[in-house]
Amino acid sequence: MPETTARAKEVTAEPDLEEIEVRELIRVIPAHHARANDPEAGDLPGAMNLDAVSAWYGAFRAVRDVSMAIPSRQVTAMIGPSGCGKSTLIRTLNRMHEVIPGSRVGGRVELDGQDIYGSTVDPVRVRRVVGMVFQRPNPFPTMSIFDNVAAGVKLAGPRPDRPVAEIVEHSLRRAALWDEVKDKLASRAVALSGGQQQRLCIARALAVEPEVLLMDEPCSALDPIATAKIEDLVRELRDSVTIVIVTHNLQQAARISDQTAFFFVDEARSGHLVEIGPTSAIFVAPREQLTQDYVSGRFG
Amino acid sequence: MNRMTDTGPVPARISLEPTVAEASRRRRDRAWTWACFAAAGTIVFLLGAIVAMVVINGLRSLSVQFFTEEMFGYEEGGALAAILGTLQIVPLATLIAAPIGVLAGIYMAETPDGRVAGLLRLATETLAGIPSVVIGIFAFTVIVVPTQTYSAFAAIVAIAVIMIPLVARSTEEIVRLVPGSVREASLALGIPQWRTTVSVVIRTAAAGILTAIMLAVARGAGETAPLILTNVGNQSVNVGDLGNAMDSLPLFIYFNSGLPSEFLIGQAWAASLVLLAFVLVINVAVRARTIGRRAA
Ligand SMILES: Nc1ncnc2c1ncn2[C@@H]1O[C@H](COP(=O)(O)OP(=O)(O)OP(=O)(O)O)[C@@H](O)[C@H]1O
Ligand SMILES: [Mg+2]
């Protein structure tokens, strides 16, 4: 027994191994991360800004004082251990947190400079501009593929200026699903594979032309091939929509995001922002020891 | 690791011979299995016996005239008036009960923690528990007595009152089964709350709600006590005159089976068969649909 503990200690103490892991991660970070410094990006719509955002479930404060900027037309990844409030925080960005009875949001969330919690702001409007994709694919079970994508256009908002069929096709193409479903638009959405269902949900969200797309662990219920497809998709969508993605997969964060935010829990189990920066910086040279420990896989 | 140095007794070989406790447990196990099987068998036997009796006696008296003629005196005619009556009373009662029941059920399901919903749920449960004869007396008192006439209208109201809580309760259960993720998906698309309920939640639950209504119809079609109190005294065809009494299958069965006429008793059996077939068809159709959906 004492022998094995000694060996375990040796492994964790071995600096080379860790560095190799981190380097592995960095190797997959593509060159496009340069966008983080692109001055033009600032003028496009879909930029968000969080100022001391907190979120409560009843008396429990799940998120504490998070301040960060979400630049437009970039991919922002949120990482951190389970229960650190990533889902809670991302749901404050489209006012979905308040749907839960007893919940409350504090602080200020701005979308292109306007407070989305302003007293005159209709949450329904916010949700049309800030779309969302959930962890488990959740197509409307009794609707056809076509109706799923058309739902947002048909059931809400102003009358579209284009034919609905055109919007559906365009959205399915943007979600890289068109070729797979174009011959069965009338069949039930639940007959699709999990990965296809998730891309359908992305198409459904895109159909209402959001400026921001929130994705809460969109690949965690998918196999590696379906995951790769969603990642490709995120990279492509990034030119037309701001993306915030929660992920437990550090490689995924490294592969697809421009900036990364790392969250952790304090003694009261409230989640808070430890560090945010360009993805390459977070994975290669984080400022905080905690971040370093997390991205090198020492816990979580 | 220490076994080599251990000096304890050599452990006995494992034996799979049943112990006394095991054998007695198996006996008890078998006894209970048989008890459950016998109880289940009793239910199947009762259903089979009733259906067989109604089918055998009913078929004997079922004829073309049964469906095409009114009753003339004691020896001639059919149940046309009763069939047409039931075909009016039950759909009209459904027309009243279904919207109220469905809307109340949706309200209870969508505002599960509200105080109003709680009261509504209590009221629904209580209403469902009131014996149908009491509901018949209620309709008699508030409609028959003031209007001074038995009427199909009073019967429709009484049957509707019986159906409403049935529809409301099952609708609530079915709407609750719609996953929260479906609601969330809709709200997150910027679809307003009311639209989410109407176009997404209800649409998802539509098949189940229809099932709930159909089961209530099956129940309403067979209710007899409220009809006896509200809607007696007319054996002729009445189409559309809700202000007067209207014959119906349960009444036809009730009155004819008590008369000293072989012919009329036979007609009552035939009417029982028709009513039973109606209810069984609904139940089987509902069952087939639910099973089909589960398998899909
Ligand atoms: N509906 C709720 N009611 C009460 N507490 C909740 C609710 N949802 C989440 N919490 C709590 O809020 C905290 C943050 O949860 P959240 O789901 O935001 O974490 P997360 O970072 O998304 O975790 P994971 O990575 O496991 O998805 C947790 O302590 C959780 O128990
Ligand atoms: Mg989460």
Image (tube, coloured by chain):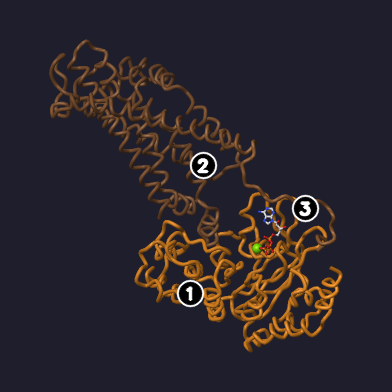
**Looking at numbered disc 1 in the image, what kind of residue is underneath it?**
Ala
- Image point 46% across, 59% down: which residue? A140
The tint chain A carries is: orange
Give how far across and how far down residue B54 sits, in percent: 27, 26
SS for dot 2: helix
Per the image, the residue denoted by label 3 is: B10
Q: Residues within 10 Å of mark 1 (few under 14, many from 20)?
A: many
Chain letter for mark 1, please: A
Residue A39 visible (yes or no)? no
User: How far apart in space, not on screen, are marks 2 and 1 (Cα)?
Assistant: 36 Å
Locate ligand 1 by image quadrant. Answer: bottom right
**Mark with earlier residue (3, 2):** 3
Please, what secondary structure does the residue beneath circle 3 have?
A: loop
- Per the model, the C-alpha gap separating discs 3 and 2 is 71 Å
Residue B13 in percent (x, y) is at 69, 51
Q: Relative to B81, is B103 above or below?
A: below
Q: Does B191 appear above or below B205?
A: below
State the residue at coordinates (65%, 36%): B21
- Circle number at residue A175: 1
Q: Which residue is mark 2?
A: B107
Q: Amino acid at mark 3?
A: Val
Q: Residue at x 28, y 23 (%)?
A: B243
Looking at the rendering, in which quadrant would you find the C terminus of chain A? bottom right
Secondary element at tag 1: loop
Mark 2 vs mark 1, foreground winner is 1
